[in-house]
């Protein structure tokens, strides 16, 4: 087993600061881009096949996957089940975002506006996002509460992660992913208690 070099000023493992920050920035950029699609003048079908939506969803998928991989390597005083569960939730979020930049685009390109809205409001689309919603709700909330109690993550990160847990209940990935990205960026730059 290799030892991890700890940044004494911040308490974060030096090898994780970069991947966690990069994942957070990519996730935030993808989420903001996806949210910007709501202001598109055309129909929802046209908005989903717009290049902004495709690129934003790709960035969200890549960022969530990068965050998940950083969390898997993160050794902290937070409950390890919650850290691992959050990584799995972020992988589910990444899969959700990937579907929005591939599958939804395929549906939008080959359906009418009415059929597209019928498919998009189907309960099966909601069920597809259920693993992301459940995993992120439980694990982000557990990380927020335990991080607040033992002060192992900055207070701001605990608050934002708690908001992200609740927003993860919304089927599209951006609201919860944006809050989680902000929280993990603060964690990567703030003081974090780490195990050696």
Image (tube, rainbow, N blue to C red):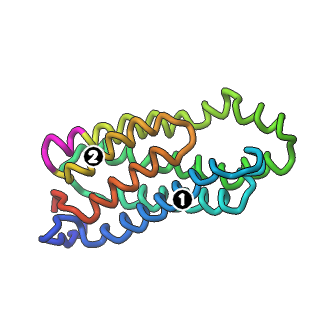
Please give the residue where the numbered disc 2 appears in the rendered image: 80
Sequence-wise, the earlier of marks 2 and 1 is 1
Q: Which mark is residue 183?
A: none
Which residue is rendered at x = 42% and y = 40% of the image?
136
Relative image position of residue 141 (x, y in whole percent): 32, 37
User: Is 95 situated above or below 21?
Assistant: above
User: Where does the magenta region start and end?
Assistant: 145-151
Please tell me how many numbered marks the rendered image carries. Answer: 2
Distance of mark 2 from mark 1, alpha carbons?
27 Å
Circle number at residue 30? 1
Q: Nearer the viewer, mark 2 or mark 1?
A: 1
Element class at badge 2: helix
Quadrant including the N terminus: bottom left
Residue drawn at x 17%, y 51% as measured from the top left: 152
Q: Position of residue 59 (x, y in %)?
A: 56, 62
How busy is the neighbourhood of tag 2: few (under 14 within 10 Å), some, or many (20 plus)? some
Q: Where residue 15 appears, x then y in whole percent?
A: 30, 72
Task: Give SS at disc 1.
Answer: helix
Q: Residue furthest top?
A: 123
Horizontal arrangement in the rendering, residue 8 relative to residue 50 (left or right)? left
Instruction: Residue 145: name its quadrant.
Output: top left
Q: Is residue 139 magenta?
A: no
């Amino acid at each position: 087993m290799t030892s991890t070099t700890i940044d004494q000023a911040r308490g974060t493992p030096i090898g994780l600061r970069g991947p966690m920050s990069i994942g957070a920035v990519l996730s935030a950029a993808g989420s903001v881009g996806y949210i910007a699609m709501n202001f598109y003048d055309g129909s929802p079908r046209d908005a989903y096949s717009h290049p902004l939506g495709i690129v934003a969803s790709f960035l969200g998928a890549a960022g969530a996957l990068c965050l998940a991989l950083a969390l898997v390597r993160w050794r902290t005083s937070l409950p390890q089940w919650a850290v691992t569960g959050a990584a799995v939730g972020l992988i589910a979020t990444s899969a959700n975002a990937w579907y929005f930049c591939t599958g939804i685009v395929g549906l939008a390109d080959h359906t009418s506006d009415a059929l597209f809205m019928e498919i998009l409001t189907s309960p099966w689309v909601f069920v597809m996002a259920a693993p992301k919603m459940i995993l992120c709700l439980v694990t982000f909330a557990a990380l927020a509460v335990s991080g607040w109690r033992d002060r192992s993550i900055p207070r701001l990160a605990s608050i934002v992660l708690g908001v992200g847990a609740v927003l993860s209940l919304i089927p599209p990935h951006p609201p919860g992913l944006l809050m989680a990205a902000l929280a993990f960026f603060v964690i990567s730059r703030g003081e974090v208690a780490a195990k050696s």
